[in-house]
Amino acid sequence: MGKAGKTGKKKQEKGWLDGAFGNLLFLAIAGGIGYCRYHGIQVPILDNLILKLKGSAGVGGGYVDEAAKSFSDAKAGKSIAVTDLLTQLNRYCGRRGACTEEYWEALPDVASALKMGPGTWDRKPLKKAQASEIDELLVKLAKRPEATSLTTWKALRSMSKEVFDVAPKSMKQSLACRLELESATPPTKSAAPEKVEVEEIVVDDLS
C-alpha cells in the first residue's frame, strides 16, 4: 500500500514538459531555429553560446563582440581589416546577403574604414576559406535591390578591391565579386514589361 502510494505521487509529480506538450514545445523551438538558419537570421542566445564554446576551443573567440566593435569603429571613422569585414557581413547580413537597414546605410563608412585599414604596414593575406566566404557574400550583396544606389555600389566595388588585394594568389583571378562589380555604375532596376495590345479581330458570321 505504501509503495503504491509513493508510485502514484511520483506519477503526479511529473514535470509540465513531459508528454505531448513537451514534444510540441521542442518541435516549435527546433522549427524556429531551422527557419532562422535557413533565412540567415541570427539566433541571439544560441549563437552567442556557440561562439563562446568556439572561443574556449580557440576557434573564432569573441566573434559577435568583434563584429559590433569593428562596425562601431568604422562608423566612427576608424580603420578596420578585411577579416573584420567578414565578421560584420556574417553578423549583419547573413548568408543570404540580406543586410540590416543600418548596415546598408553605413556601408560607405565601412568601405572607407576598410580602405584605411592595415594595408601598407600590416596587410596579411586571407586564408582561402575566408576569401571565398567574403567573395560569395559580396556577390549576394551586389545582387540585392539596395545595391542599385550609386553610393552603395561604389562602396561594394571598393570592398571587392580590398578583398582582391589580400586574397591568395591562386584565387585572385577567380574572385566572383570582382566580375560582379566590374561595372562602374550599378545595374538599373528592371522596368515593368510593356503591355502589348492585341488587336481584336472580328469575324463576320458567314452562316
Image (spheres, grey):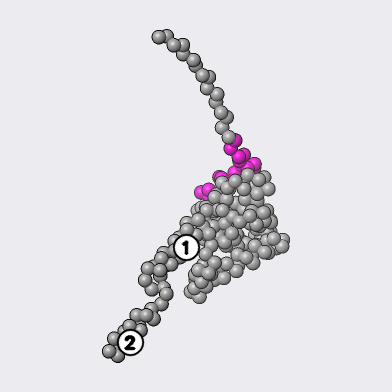
Front in this rendered view, residue 202 or 1? 1
Query: Residue 44 in the image: x percent, y percent?
Result: 54, 67
Give the magenta-colored segment's residue range: 172-191
Magenta includes 186?
Answer: yes
Residue 158, visible in the rendered structure? no
Q: Nearer the viewer, residue 136 or 124?
A: 136
Q: Is residue 74 left or right of residue 177?
A: right
Determine if the magenta segment contains residue 51: no
Write down the residue under mark 2. Answer: 6
- Circle 2 crowding by C-alpha within 10 Å: few under 14, some 14–19, many from 20: few
Q: Position of residue 59 (x, y in %)?
A: 50, 70
Q: Is residue 168 left or right of residue 156?
A: left
In the picture, measured across the screen, residue 174 lies left or right of residue 185, that is left
For disc 1, the marked residue is: 33
Which amino acid type corresponds to the residue marked 1 in the rendered image? Ile
Q: How many marks?
A: 2
Give the Cα distance between marks 2 and 1.
Answer: 40 Å
Of 38 and 188, the residue lying toward us: 38
Residue 157, image x, y percentages: 62, 49
Residue 19: x %, y % from top left: 37, 71
